[in-house]
Image (cartoon, rainbow, N blue to C red):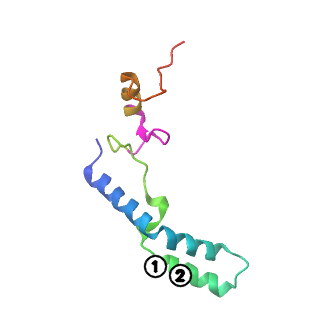
Amino acid sequence: MAKLSSINKNEKRKKLVKKYAGKYARLKAVAADESLDETERLIARLKLAEVPRNANPTRVRNRCEVTGRPRAYYRKFRLCRVQLRELGNMGLIPGLTKSSW
């Protein structure tokens, strides 16, 4: 089980990302649009710098839903490899079978 503080910190980041998603996307689009004037793009970049650092989507860490483990994460199942194996062996994940040959 991961530290509860790490899990809570990541949850706060997810909320901030969701809150600022629209503003972040608009500013990002203006800053990347090369058809606009250079000063407009610069202003957009400066406003983007004022957005809280944790509102950046890349700062959110993928974590296992069961244990909060940050490594060996499978996006499809939203689980880490350890839980994927345990739950798969118990037959709790539909469509997942243990391979044998």
Report the quarter where the N terminus lies: top left
Quarter occupied by residue 37: bottom right
Residue 100: image x %, image y %? Answer: 51, 14
Three-letter code for the amino acid on which mark 2 is drawn: Leu
Residue 80 to residue 15: above or below: above
Report the quarter where the C terminus lies: top right
Residue 55 to residue 11: above or below: below
Q: Residues within 10 Å of mark 2 (few under 14, many from 20)?
A: few
Q: Mark 1 highlights which residue?
A: 50
Q: Are marks 2 and 1 in contact (CB under 8 Å)?
A: yes
Residues 23 and 47: in front is: 23
Residue 40 falls inside the magenta stretch? no
Q: Mark 2 highlights which residue?
A: 46
Q: Would residue 14 be found to the left or right of residue 2 on screen?
A: right
Q: Looking at the image, which residue is at 51% across and 76% down? A: 48
- Magenta segment range? 70-82
Residue 79 falls inside the magenta stretch? yes
Q: Looking at the image, which residue is at 50% across and 19% down? A: 99
Quarter occupied by residue 38: bottom right
Residue 86: image x %, image y %? Answer: 36, 27
User: Which element is circle 2 on?
Assistant: helix
Residue 51 to residue 77: above or below: below
Furthest residue toward left: 4
